Amino acid sequence: MKYPYILLLTMTALLLTACNNDESTNSGSVNDGESPNESNALEHGVTDQGEVGFEMAGGKIEEATNVPEEQRQAILSAFDTYMKAFNDEDVETYMSVIAKEPEGFEYAEEEQLVSKTFKEYDVDRTADNITLIKYDKNQAQVFANFDISMVQESSGAELDRSGRQVTVFANEDGEWKVTSVFFIGDKVE
């Protein structure tokens, strides 16, 4: 299942499934009138689960063993920049770790949607169990458990959500850039 834009996917997961007790992959928008099939900032690059290095619904997470240490550090540094820039609402730095030719979303649209999201929401994402699960010289996949806290600035509405994410990086001219993202929200208790 292809989804552009992880940013709106995460907010959608948070807002639209808050009352749903079933584990689900999320799509749609965050209370902005967009239908689930329209592009939005939370769903960037989410693609078919068969392409990731584990089953999103609960497969065993194992660290890739074939990663040269220099590449491991570069990939994890790119992931750290991706997370920090998002939480700091730093569009320029965030876009510096997004692939220029990503799979499943458009670079220019991502920049516009992220800017809009930063204006309308206060979102804080934290990641733990960060594991480099798949690697070759052209692509790497980083798994993490995510906790997401959101506040819609106009209404003050708050929502907390957890899930699992695989961030897929492409090697563009020797730099690791986010090219797609797989996310699945956990059950809402």
Image (cartoon, helix red, strand yellow):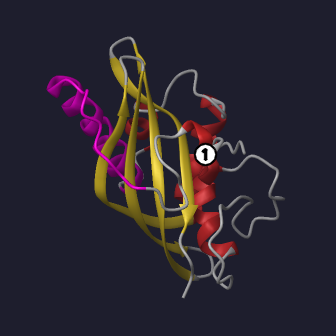
User: Foreground: 75 or 50?
Assistant: 50
User: Foreground: 15 or 162?
Assistant: 162
Count of numbered circles on the image: 1
Q: Is residue 11 above or below residue 142?
A: below
Task: Give x and y (percent) for residue 116.
Answer: 61, 52
Residue at (53, 55) in percent of width and height: 56
Q: Main secondary structure of the magenta part?
A: helix
**In the current view of this chain or complex, which residue is farthest to the bottom?**
189
Residue 80 is a magenta residue: yes
Figure quadrant of residue 144: bottom left
Residue 48 is a magenta residue: no
Which residue carries the number 1 mark?
Answer: 49
Q: Is residue 20 left or right of residue 133?
A: right
**In the current view of this chain or complex, which residue is farthest to the front?**
60
Task: Give x and y (percent) for residue 111.
Answer: 57, 38
Q: Is residue 45 visible?
A: no
Q: Quadrant of the C terminus?
A: bottom right
User: Foreground: 187 or 15?
Assistant: 187
Task: Give x and y (percent) for residue 65.
Answer: 24, 33
Q: Is residue 140 visible?
A: yes
User: Foreground: 74 or 137?
Assistant: 137
Q: Secondary structure at mark 1?
A: helix
Q: Is residue 96 above or below residue 86?
A: above
Residue at (42, 40) in percent of width and height: 94
| Magenta stretch in the rendered image | 60-87
Figure quadrant of residue 101: top right
Task: Give x and y (percent) for residue 31.
Answer: 73, 70
* Other residues around mark 1 within 10 Å, as few (<14) / some (14–19) / many (≥20): some
> What is the three-letter code of the residue carrying label 1?
Gln
Q: Quadrant of the N terminus?
A: top right
Figure quadrant of residue 2: top right
